Structures are given as C-alpha cells and as structure tokens.
Amino acid sequence: MPPRLRFQASTAWPITAILAPRSAVPFRRAISAVTTPPIHESIHVPCRSNGFITVDVFHGLKSSSPTILYLPSGPVLPGTQDEEAGVISLLRETTGGTVARINYRASAAHNYPTPFHDVLYGFDWIRENLLLDEFKRPYLARLGICGELMGGSLATMLSLTECRLGESRIGATALNNPIVDWVFPDELPVVDPSELPEPLAPDETAFPAEEDMMDSSQVSTKTSKPRKTRKRTPKSPPQTAWQRYGDNKILPTLTLVAERDNLFTKPDDYLDRFASPMHFFRSPHAQLLRPQHDDIFASKQPDEILDIEAQMILDHYNSITHQTPPAPELPILSRCRSYARNYPPAGSKLSLPAWSITAGLASPLADQASELAKVLRRSAARHALKSHAGRTRWHDKAEKEMYEELAEEKVHLRSLPGLGLWTDQADDEWEKSIRNVGTWMKERLETGNT
C-alpha cells in the first residue's frame, strides 16, 4: 500500500455557485455553524510521482452523516457520467450522507496497478480530510463503498484490505455486476474436471475450491477406497452465464476481454489478488504456461565438447543456412485445478464489512457475483464459528445451518431484471435498486450495525 498522503489540495469551482478561486490550502470543514460547505467540490489529489486524480465530494446535510465512497464503472462501460450522477444523487438522498467519488484512471496509458493505487490514494485523502469534526479533529468511522463493473472490482479489493479494527475502515459494501476475476475461464478450452492439471506451484491449502473446508467429512474422504463404477458418457456441463448472455449489445463478453487486454500488459497481472479479488479466497482457475525458447537449450553445455576443426565446419554450415528465427511464442493461459484459501488470515485484525451484492439475471457476470457471495459467506461463517466456539469445523448439520444463516444476514445476494446495471436507467427499476442500496447502507453504518 502506498504511504499515507501528506499534501495540500486545492478546491475546484462548485457546481451550484460561482465562488472566488481559492489558494492551495488544505481542505477543512467550516467551523462556523452558519457557514455550510458547498454541495459539490472537486479536489485534486496528488499520486506522488504519478500525476494526480480528482475526488468529487457531494456533501451531506449534516457533519455527522455517514461518508460513502463511489467508484465509477470504468472503461468497460464508457459515456455514463450523467447516469452515474443520478446514482450519486439518489445515494446522497437516501443515506443523507456525504458521497465521495474517486475518479481513478484506467486505460492503456494508465493500466494496472495504477487504478487500485489511485483508489488507495483517494481513500487515504478521504480519511484524512473528510473524517474531521467541527474542531478539525479526526475521528474514527466506518465508511460505505459502492461500485459497479470495474468499480465493483476495486471496491471489493478495498473492502477486503481496508477493514482493520481500530482504524477508520470500510463497514458496508454495495456491489453490482462486479468483475472480481479477470481470468474469465469460460474463454479457455474446456477440460473435464477429472483431467484438470495441478497448478505449477503448491497453494495455501489442499482443499479444492468447490469444497467446504469447515465440513468435517472432507477430512476422511482421501482415506476411503474409490469404488469401481461403470464408465458413462460424460454429460456436457450446463452453460454458464458468460456463455448464455455473452452476446448482449450493452455488455458483451468480447468487450470485457478486449478491455482486460487493454488494462493489463501481461496475463500475470490479472492473476494478482489485488486485480482479481476472488483470488483472495481461492487460487486462479488458470495458470500461465511459458514455452521454452531455443536460447534456453542453446545455453546448455553439450555432452561432448567438439574439437576446433569440427566446430569451424559446423559454424560455416550454419552461416550458409542461417535464417531469421521465428518470433517467440506468447505465454499461454491454461486451465488448472483451483484450491481454497483462508481469508482473512488469522491474527490480521481484519473484520470484513457487510455486503450487498446484486447482478442482472441476464448478465454475463452473474456467476462471478454468485461465487463472490458464496466465498464471503463461508468466510463470515468460519470467522463466527472460530470466535464463538474456538473451532474451524462444523460438529453437525444443525450447527452448520445456524452459522450459514448468520453469514447470509451479513452477505446479501439479489438478482435484478435484465443486465441489472445501475447506469441502465430506461425504467424505474434502477431507481428502486439504488434506493434499496442507500437504505441498506444507512442501516449498516449506524452505530451497532456491522
């Protein structure tokens, strides 16, 4: 994480009034009870040696109102500034809070890791400049965060890492159609699950990602002898959301893949946990296979060293038949087995926030939202069981159901009609969805609700 920011920010022209330009002074809340801050301010936030970003602050009606971060949908869905302004307006109305939009950079010129560095700089600025009382004293607070598509990816990353107890932290996270795994395994060749290769390097656990690590019965499965079964013709797996809805006109899978290749210089980058936050909870479903180049073999010593005369003849022959070598092959993404990971790690003092996850019924990203909710619920159930009983495995089915019910209260998953995009405002459904998010977030950020 970049070091905490120390800088001075200039205040831009507010939208609702024409003010005299200010000199570069630190942003502060007004002390006078009569003077209120402007409704909207745009702040330039330096990013050390990597330029600057802007943070748009839409102030709440009260200084004690909650603070909510909003992360735009990014280049995956360009040209939605007006629609996102409507989303921010509704969030501010329903929560009564201050909404701070972090305008992170994401393009071929500002590829990863620039986007999440920008978000971290913006988050630091918000904690240091917006969480101040009328006497300019900092106070601890739980913040909310909202994001869709790429903004949902970055919001997930921030929520998983900036939730440390004893600090101002993310306490409630609302995501819509988040991109939490840039690998997109459905674009890779299909491999029968029984024939998937092991990853090149061992992972944190030996539990397959699909299994529940808290189930005691999983421990004895490896010792039992496999029973002989008749070979049957394998059934084709059901289509995924990526396959069923990939040809839609607004969010086609071709656009998602093209933007990924535009935002990442090499495949290694989107295998990173901070880029694909699903990998905090499981290893990737794919690995990068690098071909061996000819120069690797050329660097090896031959078994028998040739004499000088034979080497001269060989060099002369090579000089006659020499051709330009072909371009080296690119690294290839290949499917592999995926294994579960424990997050948050023990002793980290990280306390994951409450979650509201939505996705469209016809969205190619619907399966990602469902998987994220599943791993978050498992994490919440494991943490609750460890805190209450000091164990990490269920005793029986009744205990499992009790803790899973608690986890579902902390991690909400809901489907929306169609693509379900917040910025698709063709009917009144989007407004209802945003109001539900605002109401839920206000309740979660109240004292005593976690």
Image (spheres, rainbow, N blue to C red):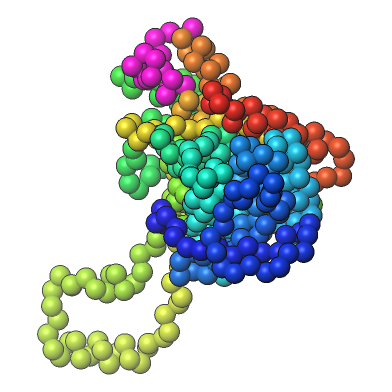
Q: Position of residue 35 (x, y in %)?
A: 68, 50
User: Viewed as shown, does residue 84 lie left or right of 375?
Assistant: right
Instruction: Look at the image and tell me whether residue 90 can be seen.
Output: yes
Does the segment drawn in magenta span residue 24? no
Q: What residue is at 57 percent from the left and 54 percent from the top?
A: 28
Q: How many numbered circles does the render carry?
A: 0
Prevailing secondary structure class for the magenta stretch in the rendered image:
helix
Q: Quadrant of residue 364?
A: top right
Q: Nearer the viewer, residue 17 or 250?
A: 17
Q: What residue is at 70 percent from the left and 41 percent from the top?
A: 61
Residue sitting at the far right:
427
Q: Nearer the viewer, residue 334 or 117?
A: 117
Q: Quadrant of residue 290?
A: bottom left
Q: What residue is at 33 percent from the left and 91 percent from the top?
A: 319
Q: Position of residue 330 (x, y in %)?
A: 47, 65
Q: Name above or below for residue 427 compared with residue 27.
A: above
Range drawn in magenta? 381-398
Q: Position of residue 214 (x, y in %)?
A: 40, 20
Does the segment drawn in magenta span residue 395? yes
Q: Name above or below for residue 389 compared with residue 140.
A: above
Q: Name above or below for residue 367 compared with residue 34.
A: above
